[in-house]
Image: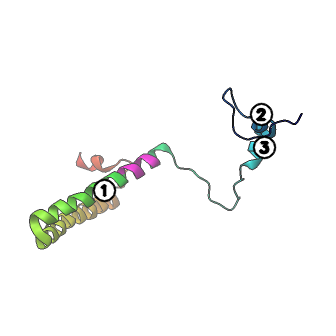
Amino acid sequence: MAEDHSTTPSAGGSSKVLAETFSLDDHEQAIPHRSPRLPPRRLKQRHVQMIALAGTLGTGLFLGSGQALSGAGPLGALIAYSLVGTVVYSSLCSLGEMTSFAPVPGSFPYYAS
């Protein structure tokens, strides 16, 4: 009598054909090996969290800009974004000046003390 070689699992468990033809060694051989010329993947948990945070903030800013456009109009939104951009740019320039004047291993709060 011939065996049934169907690949669908029966009600009682997995298929006999799949159990016979697929082993751990076959699975390990099926995984493609990385080429030595590709850069290594070294993302740490903090990198992934920062990417997620940046994506969330970017979406919030995009949606918030629509609310600013509807409330202030295009000219008002442009003036507000220019004003805030000027303040942020001034803060970054002053932080750069403080860092070049007194290079310390600390971060931004060090300059406040």
Please state, as top left, top right, bottom left or bottom right, where the C terminus lies in the image. top left
* Marker disc for residue 59: 1
Please state the total of marks drawn on the protein image: 3
Could you say which is closer to the camera, residue 9 or residue 87?
A: 9
N-term mark: 2 or 3: 2
Residue linked to disc 2:
16
**Is residue 80 within the magenta segment?**
no
Crowding around mark 3 (Cα neighbors within 10 Å: few <14, some 14 to 19, many 20+) is: few
Q: Distance between the residues labelled 1 and 3?
A: 44 Å
Magenta range is 48-53
| Amino acid marked by disc 2 | Lys
The residue sitting at 27% across, 60% down in the picture is 62
State how far apart marks 2 and 1 are (Cα).
Answer: 50 Å
Given residues 11 and 19, the one toward you in this image is: 11
Depth-wise, is mark 2 or mark 3 nearer the camera? 2
Q: Residue at x 71, y 58 (%)?
A: 36
